[in-house]
Structures are given as C-alpha cells and as structure tokens.
Image (spheres, grey):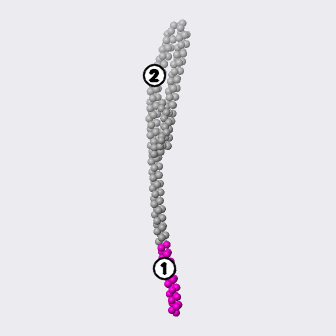
Amino acid sequence: MIKLASIIFKVGGVVLLGATVGVFSHWRYTAGKESANTVWQSRWDKRNIADVELMARYQREAREEEQRRIKAIIQVNEDANLQLNAARADAARAKSVIISLRNTVRYMQQKLAADNAAGVSATVGKRQAGGDSHLLLADMFAESLKRNQQLAAYADRARIRGRACERAYDAITQSAAGAVKTSYNIER
C-alpha cells in the first residue's frame, strides 16, 4: 500500500506540477499578448491621430488655396471693370471730338453749298462738281470716324477682357508658394 500511495502521490504531484506549469504558461502568454496588443494599439492610435491631423492640414491648405484663388479672381474682375470704365470714358471723350468734327464738316458743307448757290452762273457747273466732291469726301470722313469709333470700342473691350482672362488664369495656376508667374501683357 505504501507503494501504491507513493505512486499516487508521485502521479498527483506530476499532474499538479503540470497543471501549475500550464496555468502559469497560459497566464504569461495572455499577459504577453495583452502587452503586445497594448503596444500595437498605441502605435495604431498614434498613426490614426497623425492621419487625422494630416487630413485636417490638407483640408486647411486646400481652403486657403481656394480663398486665395477667389480673391485673385475678384481682384482681376475689379481691375477689368476699372479698365472697361476707363475705356468707356475714353470712348465718350472720342465721341465728343467726333461730334465736334461732324459739326465742323456740316458747317463746311453748308458753306460750300451757299458758295455754290451764290456763284456766277458761268462757273456754277465747275463749282458744283467741286462742291459735290467735297461733300462726298466730308460724308465719307464722317462715316469713317463713326466706324473707327465702333472698332476702337470693340478692340478696347476685347483687349481688356483678354488680359483679365490671362490674369485670372495666372492667378489660379500660380501656387500659393509663389511659382513663377507667366505674363502675356501686351501694352498699347
């Protein structure tokens, strides 16, 4: 019996020792796993925070760039409107000069007609032919002035709008860091 008790005691001790080693090993395994998970979770959290901060920075920079572009377009439009108003004022001044020239031409036409009517009958035919050519030239000159005024106004509008378009393109394509600006300024 003693031998049987000794064997049972030895087997029980081995089983108890095995169970203790198994429980200890499992405890250490889960502790190591939890420690590793905590370290990795900390790294992932830091990465996620960095990603959120980077996304916020990109969005802020994009909004700033958008605002810069909007301000540039507004400035270009204001400049173009000022130039158009200046061109309109120039056209109005030119129109007053043209009106003055037309009045002068009309006066000269009337004077030539009066001179022709008062002329001697022998020279009336000759004067009539000369007067008619002067009247024709005066009419052509007046029409030429009118057409030149229209073409100049159109050219001014086209030039101002074209330059405004170029400045808007340059303002939009120019980076916020101040890239080299290309300019297509064609002065009068």
Q: CA distance from mark 2 to mark 1?
A: 119 Å
Magenta region includes residue 27: yes
Residue 100's label in the rendered image is 2
Relative vertical location of residue 183 with respect to residue 125 in this rendering, above or below: below
Relative vertical location of residue 143 with respect to residue 173 in this rendering, above or below: above
**Location of residue 155 in the rendering, given as x and y in whole percent from the top left corner:** 51, 31
Task: Give whichever of discs 2 and 1 has the lower sequence position.
Answer: 1
Name the one closer to the observer, 109 or 11. 11
Magenta region includes residue 171: no
Q: Is residue 130 visible?
A: yes
Q: Check disc 1 and give the amino acid type.
A: Thr
**Location of residue 135 in the rendering, given as x and y in whole percent from the top left corner:** 52, 17
Q: Residue at x 48, y 40 (%)?
A: 181
Q: Which residues are magenta?
A: 1-29
Crowdedness near tag 1: few (<14), some (14–19) or many (≥20) residues, C-alpha within 10 Å? few
Residue found at the far bottom of this picture? 1
Q: Residue at x 45, y 48 (%)?
A: 64
Relative vertical location of residue 125 with respect to residue 158 in this rendering, above or below: above
Q: Is residue 70 visible?
A: no
Crowdedness near tag 2: few (<14), some (14–19) or many (≥20) residues, C-alpha within 10 Å? few
**Location of residue 157 in the rendering, given as x and y in whole percent from the top left corner:** 49, 33
Name the one closer to the observer, 143 or 12. 12
Name the one closer to the observer, 8 or 44. 8
Q: Check disc 2 and give the amino acid type.
A: Ser
Q: Residue at x 50, y 87 (%)?
A: 9
Residue 20's label in the rendered image is 1
What's the magenta bit mostly, secondary-structure-wise?
A: helix
